[in-house]
Amino acid sequence: MSVGSVHISTRTLQASEAINTSSNTTQIDLRISHPMENGARKDAQGVVIPAWHLTRLEVFHNDKKITELALGPLVARNPAVSLALNGGSEEDVIKVLWSDNRGESGESSTQIN
Amino acid sequence: MKRRDWIKTVGLGSLAVVPTVPTRLLGDVSSAFDTELFELVGSSDIKPDRRVELLVQTDAPNGAVIPVSVVSSVPDTQRIIILVSDHAKAEVAQIDTSHTLMAPRLSTHLQLQRPATVTALVETGMGWYRSSARIESLGESC
């Protein structure tokens, strides 16, 4: 995967996994290709590798923003982030926008299945 | 299997590993951590609570990469923040869960440089709640 490519997968949680049992819960798993350099590591020559990490994710449900996440440099390389929706139906569209501390950004979307 | 040897720490149970010191917000952590925490929360009133469920591994079989998951059953959870002590930047991740569609849970992976206390903070309309766990061993890097 190239830097910033986003893989989104969804699944409906079983009742035992769900938080609100009055409705179904859809788990959204994000996997984002990113080096997530924390600015503390050094290369083979002993030179500090500059910080380069995701700073923000915005999540949209059918084009309406439903949440945003702030991420720091301690999140591991190629971040995996899971969150959950109260409800969610097949063919609903989930879109994710990302940005990092270098000012780079991107987006990806998928349908709930 | 050790890889799956998850520990589950909740609310009051975590007090055993994070002793309270009156001059510190969360006890055994650095003043730099306290400063960042106070900037985030704007209050020293952060109650340990069993409804803040923090799932974290005590060791890191794949280098220093550690899965962490937070689930809040505190009503009206508006925000979840994951913090670590003993690192230059305390805040790992935070999520806004105020939208009715958002369930109050967040999972990700940490890349720690040294042992640390992981703290989950939950903001509600009634105040702040937390749970903490100490990661003592980071295992060997691959």
Image (spheres, coloured by chain):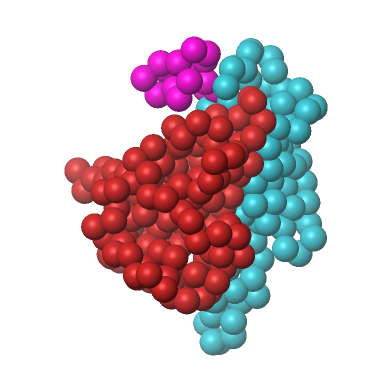
Q: Is residue A18 above or below residue B35?
A: above
Q: Residue at x 61, y 65 (%)?
A: B39
Residue B38 place in picture, x, y as percent: 56, 65
* Quarter that holds the N terminus of chain B: top left
Classified by dominant secondary structure, the portion drawn in magenta counts as: loop
x 24%, y 57%: residue: B16
Give the answer, above or below, for where B55 lies relative to B20. above
Q: Note whether residue B71 is visible.
A: yes
Please give the name of the residue rendered at 33% of the width and 65% of the height, measured from the top-left corner. B20
Does residue A76 appear to the left or right of A17 in the view shown? right
Task: Decide whether residue B114 is among the magenta residues.
Answer: no
Decide which of B36, B128 is in the foreground and name it: B128
Residue A17, magenta (yes or no):
yes
Residue pushed farthest left? B1
**In the rendered picture of this protein, how many numbered marks are placed on residues?**
0
Look at the image and give the residue range highlighted in magenta: A8-26
**Chain identifier, red in the render:** B
Q: Is residue B142 left or right of residue B104?
A: left
Q: Quadrant of residue A7?
A: top right
Q: Is residue A72 visible?
A: no
Quarter holding residue B97: top right
Where residue B42 sits in the image (x, y, percent)? 60, 60
Instruction: Say which residue appears at 26% left-offset and 60% top-offset.
Output: B17
- Percent of width and height locating residue A90: 64, 13
The image shows residue A111 at horizontal and vertical percentages of 68, 21
* Chain coloured cyan in the rendered structure: A
Toward the bottom, the furthest residue is A46
Which part of the image, by quadrant, shows the C terminus of chain B? Answer: bottom left
Q: Nearer the viewer, residue B72 or A16?
A: B72
